[in-house]
Image (cartoon, helix red, strand yellow):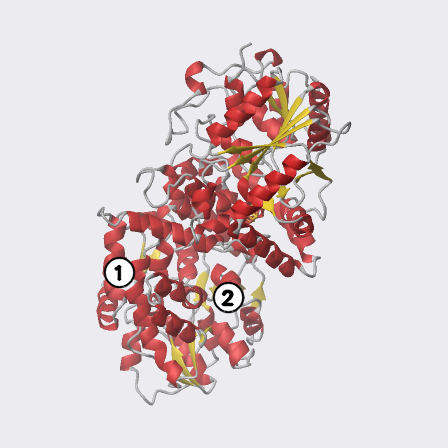
């Protein structure tokens, strides 16, 4: 059967992407190269889910022109920010909870190998099978082989970042297996042949009118009189998915947490689609990043308080599913856990960067990020957008530090921030994202030391001047010459590159006629103490 | 109290009115102000751009310029900038340690412990909120990111402003949202920075304020530069300038001086 490479069978009304679009080139593929002409999405499906599109400044420039996107995002992020702030504000020991979450994660990273082996022992003891995947390809192959061994060509999926990261749906499609996303937002993205733009709400860049269009065009069984009322849209998706839940023999999920001391896996969700996937099919395959292990069952107490409030702004998520191995006569009778590395051990080896592995994928940092709010998720060129993406993606892909080449678009990600600190402030596990961004920038700079760059030369010169008061004083006086450029208006409105980046939208005041230093020196010693802010 | 003033590199050259007002304000309150001439810059620009090696001599110079505070030369150090105070407190030690300079890092940390942003010094150390200022204008306050989230100054600047005689202080909508400056971010990601700036300016204009104030000259340079470009008729003044303003020596809000630029 012909399918789109996302795994959507054509008989369901979805168009087939032309062959040359299905596998655009390797890393650095520009967003336009693989664009499907009639796609709802602006983004082609990449070969590398952690590296697609242009460098951030270029991708952002395009995204900023999308007025619909900006309106949708501003509305969605401000709504969820308000909700989060309200439910976090009512927890008196929130800061203590964050400290606890951070401490548990620090402990996990300190003894990850031991905890993973403990998890494996306990999953196996309860009737599960554990697989270890070094990278995305290996994980995808393991899953595809397991599905094929069951003799089925359809699976249902619970929304999972790990399988987004490995490009599992595309890999399964190549093997003739259709993977059906069952999370509402993920379904929208899949039907639109789009890429996710948010780790919790992958279709956050869509408004309900767009979603209605997508359903009518791509769902196959959407009621023709479908309106854009959210409840109606949800009901249509529900009817569409129900058949799949009942017929699917295999389900694939991610995991929010894997408990080492009991072998228990956890998925938290809002819609109940996860619960169906995790209980109805005969076989369950869970792909989990190795950093998601927690030491003990009681540790869940901390994270199950932190996660829903940070992520959906709910006190408790509607569905929390926990399962341990296989229970005869109840739920899936075959359970596989695929433990995914895919660059994580490299991140773990890094003293500063490893805190990025503490992330519990709540998405709070995306929702508060002023950069993300303007440009959306696609500009980050990775399934991990926003502040966490800006520190995780370059590390997972070895982009910072020049290891993957100076033209790697992911090397631009650590600069996609004003370092405003809003992400750090809300992160439930207290990841100091701004400090890690600075560290990654430093690595980039250090790797570049052999190559002459304009920025490097400017920073060296500035270091020379700014480390000595005499030199700085002279430079300050020389800067006063900038008043000539400013003329009588006192403002500078055009400058050559790179300063033109400033003057395209902002004036620059003329440097002061007299530096503070000179004013201080010239000031009469017995100057009246009451003199106010008078200017020379 | 004997107080050493950090003018900040930007304040020294581009916005001397901010350190000047800081000095005059503290003197008016009866303190003795010193300007350690050896100072130049705290190193923040180099650090935030990733040039940590280049930041070392800059940080060393700053630490050595202010280390006499450890011998009791001064009682405290004041900085009229949230982000420079943040850099002193949270970055200088890291820069030194990363370069293997543990002794310098310890000195940096000790100096940082005596360093205060202006509103912190006034409210926490000197215990004043009413500084006797007079400023009869409509003003809105932008809490800069680093003063808010790195230093946690909270409502200290607002308490100081509320006590100013004659002031009409109006709340800025979405005040805590970043203005889009971010140092070299404004150049490297100029379009995104401009989009953030546009929203900030919309909120500033919605207040009907004639003056926008903040505790950081850098953010004011950014927002003020945008307001100047669109001829918004809103002037930017550093928090210190409003607090230094008195009936005898008012801070200038003259006609034609509405573009936020230095005179
Ligand atoms: S980095 Fe923190 S705030 Fe961002 S998604 Fe991860 S846990 Fe949530």
Give coordinates of residue A37: x percent, y percent.
46, 19
Camera-side residue of A65 and A134: A134
Q: Is mark 2 within 8 Å of ligand 1?
A: no
Query: As rendered, which of B117 and A137 lies closer to the eye?
Result: A137
Residue A186 on image: x %, y %:
60, 30
The outermost residue toward the top is A1
Q: Which mark is residue A462?
A: 1
The residue depicted at 68 percent of the width and 34 percent of the height is: A325
User: A169 or A134: which is nearer to us?
Assistant: A134
Q: Is A419 left or right of A221, judged from the image as shown?
A: left
> Chain for mark 2?
B
Give the percent coordinates (x, y) of residue A493.
32, 52
Residue occupying the far bottom of the picture: A526
Q: Looking at this view, is A375 or A11 the one in front?
A: A11
A329 sits to left or right of A227: right
- Residue at far right of view: A329
SS assignment at label 1: helix
Q: Report whether B54 appears left or right of A158.
A: left
Which residue is tagged 2?
B151
- Secondary element type, mark 2: loop
> Which label was assigned to residue B108?
none
Give percent across and percent down for residue B4: 39, 80
Above or below — where is B92 with respect to A297?
below
The N terminus of chain B - image quarter: bottom left
Please determine if labels 1 and 2 lie on a single subunit.
no
Q: Label 1 to label 2, Cα distance in Å?
A: 26 Å
Considering only vertical position in the picture, is A265 above or below B165? above
- Asked if the residue at label 1 sits under 8 Å from ligand 1, the reply is no
């Amino acid at each position: 059967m012909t399918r789109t490479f996302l795994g959507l069978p054509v008989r369901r009304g979805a168009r087939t992407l032309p062959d040359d679009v299905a596998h655009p080139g390797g890393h650095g593929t520009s967003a336009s190269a693989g664009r499907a002409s009639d796609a709802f999405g602006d983004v082609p499906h990449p070969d590398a889910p952690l590296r697609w599109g242009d460098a951030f400044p270029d991708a952002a420039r395009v995204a900023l022109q999308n007025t619909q996107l900006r309106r949708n995002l501003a509305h969605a992020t401000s709504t969820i920010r308000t909700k989060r702030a309200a439910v976090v504000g009512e927890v008196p020991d929130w800061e203590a909870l964050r400290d606890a979450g951070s401490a548990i994660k620090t402990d996990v990273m300190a003894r990850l190998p031991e905890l993973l082996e403990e998890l494996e022992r306990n999953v196996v003891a309860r009737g599960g099978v554990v697989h270890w995947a070094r990278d995305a390809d290996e994980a995808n192959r393991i899953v595809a082989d397991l599905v094929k061994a069951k003799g089925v060509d359809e699976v249902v999926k619970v929304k999972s970042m790990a399988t987004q990261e490995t490009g599992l749906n595309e890999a399964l499609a190549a093997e003739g297996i259709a993977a059906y996303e069952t999370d509402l937002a993920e379904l929208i993205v899949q039907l639109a042949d789009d890429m996710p733009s948010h780790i919790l709400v992958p279709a956050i860049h869509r408004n309900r009118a767009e979603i209605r269009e997508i359903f009518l065009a791509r769902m196959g069984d959407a009621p023709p009189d479908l309106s854009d009322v959210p409840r109606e849209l949800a009901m249509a998706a529900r009817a569409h998915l129900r058949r799949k839940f009942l017929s699917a023999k295999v389900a694939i999920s991610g995991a929010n947490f894997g408990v080492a001391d009991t072998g228990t896996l956890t998925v938290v969700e809002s819609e109940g689609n996860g619960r169906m996937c995790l209980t109805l099919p005969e076989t369950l395959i869970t792909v989990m990043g190795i950093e998601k292990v927690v030491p003990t069952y009681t540790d869940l107490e901390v994270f199950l308080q932190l996660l829903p409030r940070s992520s959906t702004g709910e006190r408790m998520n509607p569905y929390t599913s926990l399962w341990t191995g296989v229970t005869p006569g109840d739920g899936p009778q075959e359970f596989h856990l695929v433990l995914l590395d895919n660059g994580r051990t490299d991140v773990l080896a890094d003293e500063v960067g490893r805190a990025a592995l503490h992330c519990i994928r709540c998405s709070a940092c995306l929702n508060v990020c002023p950069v993300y709010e303007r440009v959306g998720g696609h500009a980050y060129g990775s399934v991990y957008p926003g502040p966490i993406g800006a520190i995780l993606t370059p590390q997972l892909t070895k982009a910072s530090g020049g290891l993957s080449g100076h033209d790697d678009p992911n090397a631009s990600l650590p600069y996609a921030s004003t370092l405003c600190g809003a992400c750090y402030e809300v992160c439930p596990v207290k990841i100091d994202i701004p400090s890690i961004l600075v560290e990654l920038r430093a690595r980039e700079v250090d790797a570049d030391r052999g190559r002459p760059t304009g920025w490097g030369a400017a920073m060296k010169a500035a270091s020379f001047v700014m480390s000595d008061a005499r030199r700085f004083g002279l430079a300050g006086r020389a800067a006063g010459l900038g008043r000539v450029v400013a003329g009588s208006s006192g403002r500078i409105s055009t400058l050559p590159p790179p300063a033109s980046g400033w003057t395209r939208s902002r004036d620059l005041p003329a440097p002061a006629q007299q530096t503070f230093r000179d004013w201080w020196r010239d000031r009469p010693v017995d100057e009246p103490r009451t003199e106010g802010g008078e200017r020379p | 109290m004997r107080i050493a003033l950090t003018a900040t590199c930007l304040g020294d050259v581009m916005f001397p009115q901010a350190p000047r007002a800081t000095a005059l304000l503290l003197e008016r309150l009866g303190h003795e102000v010193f300007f350690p001439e050896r100072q130049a810059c705290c190193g923040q620009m180099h650090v935030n751009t990733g040039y940590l090696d280049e930041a070392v001599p800059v940080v060393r110079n700053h630490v050595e310029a202010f280390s006499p505070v450890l011998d009791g030369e001064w009682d405290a150090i004041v900085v009229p900038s949230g982000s420079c105070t943040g850099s002193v407190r949270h970055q200088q030690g890291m820069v030194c340690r990363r370069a293997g300079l543990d002794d310098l890092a310890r000195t940096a940390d000790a100096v940082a412990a005596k360093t205060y942003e202006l509103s912190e010094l006034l409210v926490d150390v000197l215990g004043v909120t009413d500084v006797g200022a007079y400023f009869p204008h409509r003003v809105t306050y932008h809490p800069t990111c680093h003063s808010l989230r790195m230093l946690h100054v909270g409502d200290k600047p607002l308490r100081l402003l509320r006590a100013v005689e004659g002031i009409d202080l109006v709340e800025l909508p979405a005040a805590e949202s970043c203005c889009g400056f971010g140092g070299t971010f404004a150049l490297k990601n100029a379009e995104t920075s401009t989009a953030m700036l546009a929203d900030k300016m919309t909120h500033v204009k919605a207040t009907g304020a004639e003056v926008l104030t903040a505790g950081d000259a850098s953010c004011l340079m950014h927002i003020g530069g945008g307001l100047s470009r669109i001829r918004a008729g809103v002037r930017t003044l550093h928090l210190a300038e409003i607090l230094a303003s008195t009936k005898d020596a008012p801070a200038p809000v003259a006609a034609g001086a509405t573009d936020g630029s230095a005179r």
